[in-house]
Amino acid sequence: MVVNIEDAGFEIRDQIQWIYGSGFPKSHNIGKSVDKLLGNEREVIDKVFPDGSKPRETQQLKIYNDNDKYIGAPKYTKGNSDYEGWGTALKPANEPICLARKPLSEKTVAENVIKYSTGGINIDGCRIGFSDDEDKKNFINDSDGINRQKNSKVRETYMNNTNIIGNHNINDNRQDGRWPSNIIFDEEAAKLLDEQSGNSSRFFYQAKVSKTERNISINTNNHPTVKPINLMTYLCRLITPKGGVVLDPFMGSGSSGISACLEGFKFIGMEMDEDYFKIAQARINNFEQYRKLLK
């Protein structure tokens, strides 16, 4: 994808990674297939969900029918071939987001934004807010700040002059939050990092789409890769100038259109599948229903 974007003439500026812990592996069980071909019997070990997790006690009533027949999860079996435990895919845990820019027509970024309003990134509009006053206090003095320059001439200059020094500024709107990162986590994927660092707001957090968000304003949204409204709102705000236009040539079920409308941008969407286009229309026409989902 990135190579094609670059070949089309765009400059690749960065690559954002949306990392999540709720991905579901779609792997072919090679060991099971080998046993089937060879006629080998497999030992029933347990009954589990497809992702390998066992049902909780509160779920038992949901996975057995009236005749006490197990219907909600497959049997977990084990074979003895050399290919037991082998598969064909890893668990998906990230989606890459390519950040590209059309080459500037003017000599500098400043001249370009004055003429076209494009070419920059809305840093302050996408800063990561603090979870509380303690988090804010820690940030001012943590390793992201000036203490990283301890015992250096740079730190000494910082302490004696709070104005801009080179590309640094000790008062760089820090009160507004952290500089947006090229990593986006969901809550589960960030849990370990937060436990180690003691901070819960270093990154933008966004879980995958819930059933509620997927189906607001329509009966069924069967698009396989619905994007979260919060995620698309954040990305639209990151690069779209005030009063600008968001173009999505692969609109899907319309999450980018909803986000553009919520942010006050104009929107142009394209979708080759007629059914998905109708879903997108219904969702975008009722974009105000999604406002309460924004954090």
Image: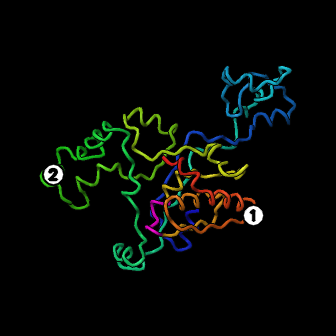
Residue with the mark numbered 2 = 153
Residue with the mark numbered 1 = 274
Q: Residue at 30% across / 46% down in the picture?
A: 144
Magenta residues, start to end: 236-243
**Quarter the N terminus occupies:** bottom right
- 280 drawn magenta: no
Quick one: label 1 or label 2, which is nearer the N terminus? 2
Q: Amino acid at mark 2?
A: Lys
**Mark 1 element type:** helix
The residue most toward the left is 160
Q: Report which quarter residue 74 is drawn in.
A: top right
Instruction: Tell me: residue 191, above or below residue 284.
Output: above
Instruction: Tell me: residue 90, above or below residue 57.
Output: below
Q: Considering depth in this image, is 179 or 269 the residue closer to the camera?
A: 269
Q: Amino acid at mark 1?
A: Glu
**Mark 2 element type:** helix
Q: Report which quarter residue 250 is drawn in.
A: bottom right
Query: Going by the image, does 251 lie left or right of 292?
Result: right
